[in-house]
Amino acid sequence: MKYRSYIRKDYSIEDIAYLAGIIDGEGSIYIGNFSKSKKGVPYYQTNIEVTNTSKNLINWLQKTFDGCISKYTRKQLPNNSRKDVYRWIIHGELVTHICELIYPFSQCKKKEIEIMLKMRETYKQTGMHRGAAGTKPVTQDILDLRLRLFNEIRNLHCRNYSSMDS
């Protein structure tokens, strides 16, 4: 797989503000922790995704901001689902750029954006990316920082439905 460099684009303030609202309400700012084997060095994947039943919204996101779109399969849907579900997902430097753009407009996910920007900065420091040749080694300090940021964002995503009073 050949990697292409991300070229930053200009977007209207209206599109950025709308995207911030969509991500605040329907989006997920995600850091995944993976390794090839039990002995392998962990590598992290950074994504932003929006899942929605509006195909028009998902198409607009892809047309306006790039990224990938997919449709959930029947096996991925709950049994009582009556509508098709679509997903828009972005990775890499596009995540960095989008986080920088939507941060001033975000209300609900500011902390997740801050964590993601710190995580994305570790990639600029190391130039690490996963490719056909495998994962380039990084220092233990960077791995420790990535693990801490992964745990921070994961803790923000934990939900406690036992009480809404606190």
Image (cartoon, helix red, strand yellow):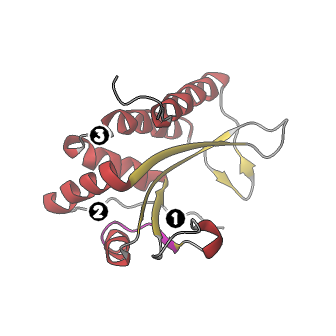
Q: Amino acid at mark 3?
A: Cys
Query: On screen, 96 above or below 149?
Result: below
| Disc 3: which residue | 108
Distance between the Cα atoms at labels 1 and 2? 15 Å
Q: Which mark is residue 49?
A: none
Cα distance, mark 2 to mark 3?
Answer: 25 Å
* Residue at (25% x, 53% y) in the render: 21
Three-letter amino acid code at disc 2? Lys
Q: Image quadrant for the N terminus? A: bottom right
Residue 26 percent location from the top left of the image? 36, 55
Of the numbered discs 1 and 2, the one sitting upstream in the chain is: 1
Viewer-closest of 42 and 137: 42
Callout 2: SS = loop
Of the image marks 2 and 3, the number of the one nearer the N terminus: 2
Amino acid type of the residue tagged 1 in the rendering: Arg
Residue 36 position within the rendered picture, expressed as x and y whole percent measured from the top left: 79, 46
**Stretch in magenta:** 64-70
- Left or right position of 155 against 141: left
The quadrant holding residue 58 is: bottom left
Q: Quadrant of the C terminus?
A: top left
Q: Please tell me whether residue 6 is drawn above or below residue 36 in the rendered image.
A: below
Q: Residue at x 53, y 34 (%)?
A: 154
Q: Is residue 1 magenta?
A: no
* Secondary structure state at the residue bearing disc 1: loop
Report the residue at 20% width, 45% height from top. Answer: 105
Tell me the tag on residue 9. 2
Where is mark 1, residue-wise? Answer: 4
Tag 1–tag 2 contact (CB < 8 Å): no
Whether the magenta-drawn stretch holds residue 69 is answered as: yes
Residue at screen point 47% across, 30% down: 162
Q: Secondary structure at mark 3?
A: loop
